[in-house]
Amino acid sequence: MHSSDGTVLTSQNAPGFGGRLRSYGNDVLYDSMSRLYRWDEGASSWVDCGPSLGSGPYAERDGRLYGVSGGAVKEYVSDAWRDVFPLPPGVSASQLAVCPDGAIWMVGGDGSTWRRGSNATEWANCGKPLSLTPAVLAAMPDNSVWAAVNVGNNAWAVARWNGGVWVDTGRPVQAPGAEVTKLLPGAGGSLYALVVGNICYSHAGQGLYELPCAIEP
């Protein structure tokens, strides 16, 4: 994960990589976190920047790192976590996504999605995509927001927020054991789903598949 000045931000148990870090595209999955480390390119070493926010959720956008802790969305600024704004009353966050325009999205504990614009004074409840809890919530470079949901019978649907409702764009993945774990932007406006856990699709157990929908400019 790169910061705005070109450094790399990552979080793990110790500089010796005692925790686990997995990267898909330009995003990073974190777990077993206790402290935040910054990669110093000049010194070729990790710099301890203090406590992390635990297991997350986290999101990164344009070199800016966000997380949730203590009932608030926070941003890592100048070697410290700063509050951006509080979560809705009584709502916890299981996922976080940040649009380039500054809008912040999250998935609440009950599976509902929430949005707060950069200049908004409160959160807006955007409901559940296709009335289901999203397994993946992703913000794209064009500020569009997408969600992947398990619709049953080994099928996964991908929905897009159109500004007022979640729209079903189809079921690109249908196979026993398949699981959509990431939605990623591709070249030329394509949208991709990272699918893990189905050797029918990939000999390595994971693969990247183009969905039958496009990111609009």
Image: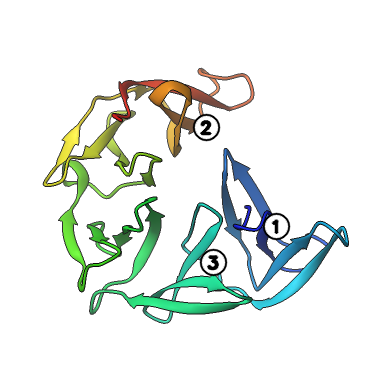
**Residue situated furthest left in the rendering:** 164
Residue assigned mark 2:
197
Taking the image as shown, residue 112 lies to the left or right of residue 209, namely left
Name the spot of residue 153 as percent of width and height, x first.
28, 29
Which of the labelled discs sits on residue 34, or is there none? none
| Cα distance between the residues tagged 2 and 1 | 33 Å
Residue at position x 37%, y 79% from top?
Answer: 71
The earlier-in-sequence mark between 3 and 1 is: 1
**Residue wearing tag 1:** 7
Q: Which of marks 2 and 1 is nearer the N terminus?
A: 1
In the figure, is residue 178 to the left or right of 116? right
Dot 3 falls on a residue whose secondary structure is: loop
Q: Which amino acid does label 3 sit on?
A: Ser
Q: Are marks 3 and 1 in contact (CB under 8 Å)?
A: no
Q: Of callouts 2 and 3, which one flags the residue occurring earlier in the amino acid sequence?
A: 3
Q: At 27% from the left edge and 50% from the top edge, which residue is drawn? A: 133
Q: What residue type is labelled 2?
A: Gly
Closer to viewer: mark 2 or mark 3? 3
Mark 2 vs mark 1: in front: 1
Q: Distance between the residues labelled 3 and 1?
A: 22 Å
Q: Which amino acid does label 1 sit on?
A: Thr
Disc 2/disc 3 C-alpha distance (Å): 23 Å
Q: Nearer the viewer, residue 57 or 141?
A: 141
